[in-house]
Image (tube, helix red, strand yellow):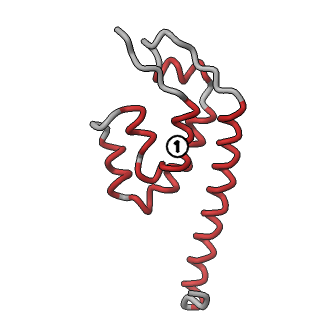
Amino acid sequence: MNVTHKNKTLATFLASIFGGIGAHRFYLYGKKDKLAWLHVVLFPLSIFAGFIAALVIGLTPDEKWDVQHNAGSGRQSNSGWLVIILVVITFAGGAIALIAAIARAFDLLFTGGAYG
């Protein structure tokens, strides 16, 4: 049985950039994955879920990744530094987005939306 090898770096990238629409779940589990479609339906809310998924995928050890996603592929993953750089960028972007969302919520709550 020839199973396609799932690249951890690509999955991290998809979760980081297109995680809000579930691209990483479509890549890993296919079109029949219900959680991937839930990402599509709840797009604005699932952006933060995509950031978290990128961190979880990127920080998963290669051995555990291969057991979960590449059991029958016959290849081993070797992530390297690119996945770590993606994790750092994702963490920074997610932190900036979260701080901006909190600041906007407080602005709307306490000033009625003074800057918007």
Viewer-proximal residue, 36 or 111? 36
Residue pointed to by mark 1? 53
Quadrant where the image shows the C terminus: bottom right
Rendered location of residue 53, percent (x, y): 52, 43
Q: What's the residue at 62%, 56% (across, down)?
A: 94
SS class, disc 1: helix
Residue 113 appears in which quarter of the rendering? bottom right
Q: Is residue 72 left or right of residue 62?
A: left
Residue 83 appears in which quarter of the rendering? top right
Rendered location of residue 43, percent (x, y): 40, 59
Rendered location of residue 66, percent (x, y): 52, 19
Rendered location of residue 35, percent (x, y): 35, 44
Q: What's the residue at 38%, 51% (across, down)?
A: 39
Q: What's the residue at 64%, 56% (across, down)?
A: 93
Picture layout, residue 58 above or below residue 46? above
Quadrant where the image shows the N terminus: top left
Picture layout, residue 32 above or below residue 79? below
